[in-house]
Image (spheres, rainbow, N blue to C red):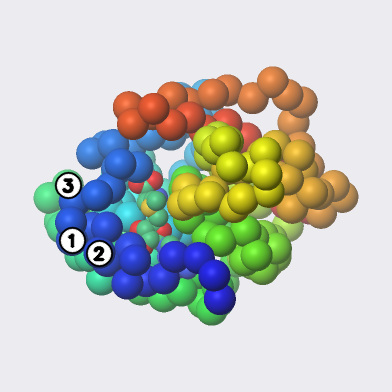
Amino acid sequence: MAGPTKEFWEERFASGNTPWDRGASSPQLALWLRAGLLKPCRILVPGCGSGYEVVDLALAGFEVTGLDYSDEAISRTHRNLEKAGVDATLVQADVLAWEPDRAFDAVYEQTCLCALYPDQWREYADRLHRWLAPGGKLFALFMQWLREGAAEGLIQGPPYHCDINAMRALFAEPRWAWGKPPYPRTEHPAGLAELAVVLARR
Ligand SMILES: C[S@@+](CC[C@H](N)C(=O)[O-])C[C@H]1O[C@@H](n2cnc3c(N)ncnc32)[C@H](O)[C@@H]1O
């Protein structure tokens, strides 16, 4: 199977080559919390990396599950939870193999989709749908990084560009309900940007 492996991510953490890592939660999380769009509930953070969002959601009173297959990501999240003095459930597993024993009210999806090779997106999107209870919400940050090679059909990443048309096809009506664009754009210190979209699972 093409695309990054667990070993790829372990090496990125070990070598400190983690440009996605802000050292803190995405500012979009605080905006969703302040706007009351994201309220304490049972929430999953797939591909949680260092776990800043896991910690901040736990601090805000959510029942959080952080999911990642990397040893280092799970250790970092564990350490960050300890430092903050809060609890969350941590699961070390492949997002393309794991199944929860109970559905979630919400999923916070930040740079897990764009970390997967596009051939795996359909499988992952189906799982996100299955993992959410009917009426549950997907809080998604869709990575915007269109590379030059795309003009010639090259698939370059990670992160893989999450084109809005591809996202509409992947999270299509009527399984998902979309709000009207334009969507807020979250800039990243590493020069990346994400589109913040809230989808309701039907
Ligand atoms: C680009 S990092 C993003 C981390 C975090 N979401 C953030 O924004 O800081 C991608 C994360 O997804 C994890 N990951 C990638 N593919 C995965 C898979 N198939 N199953 C579980 N975790 C995966 C990696 O180990 C890594 O921690």
For image coordinates 30% across by 41% down, the residue present is 19
10 Å crowding of disc 3: few (<14), some (14-19), many (20+)? few
For image coordinates 55% across by 54% down, the residue present is 113
Mark 1 residue element: helix
Ligand 1 found in image quarter: bottom left
Cβ(mark 1) to ligand 1 < 8 Å? no
Residue on which the image places disc 2: 11
State the image coordinates of residue 95 (x, y, percent, origin top left): 50, 69
User: Label 1, label 3: how many angstroms apart (C-alpha)?
Assistant: 23 Å
Name the side, left or right, on which 189 lies relative to 202: left
Residue 31 can be seen in this image: yes
**Among numbered discs 1 and 3, the one appearing first in the sequence:** 1
Q: Nearer the viewer, residue 123 or 146?
A: 146
Q: Nearer the viewer, residue 148 or 165?
A: 148
Q: Amino acid at mark 3?
A: Ala
- Indicate which label's residue lies in the foreground, 1 or 3: 1
Mark 3 residue element: helix
User: Label 2, label 3: how many angstroms apart (C-alpha)?
Assistant: 26 Å
State the image coordinates of residue 138 (x, y, percent, origin top left): 61, 47
Asked whether disc 1 touches disc 2, contact meaning CB atoms under 8 Å apart, the reply is: yes
Q: Amino acid at mark 2?
A: Glu
Which quadrant of the view contains residue 118?
Answer: bottom right
Q: Amino acid at mark 1?
A: Ala
Residue on which the image places disc 1: 14
For image coordinates 74% across by 53% down, the residue present is 170
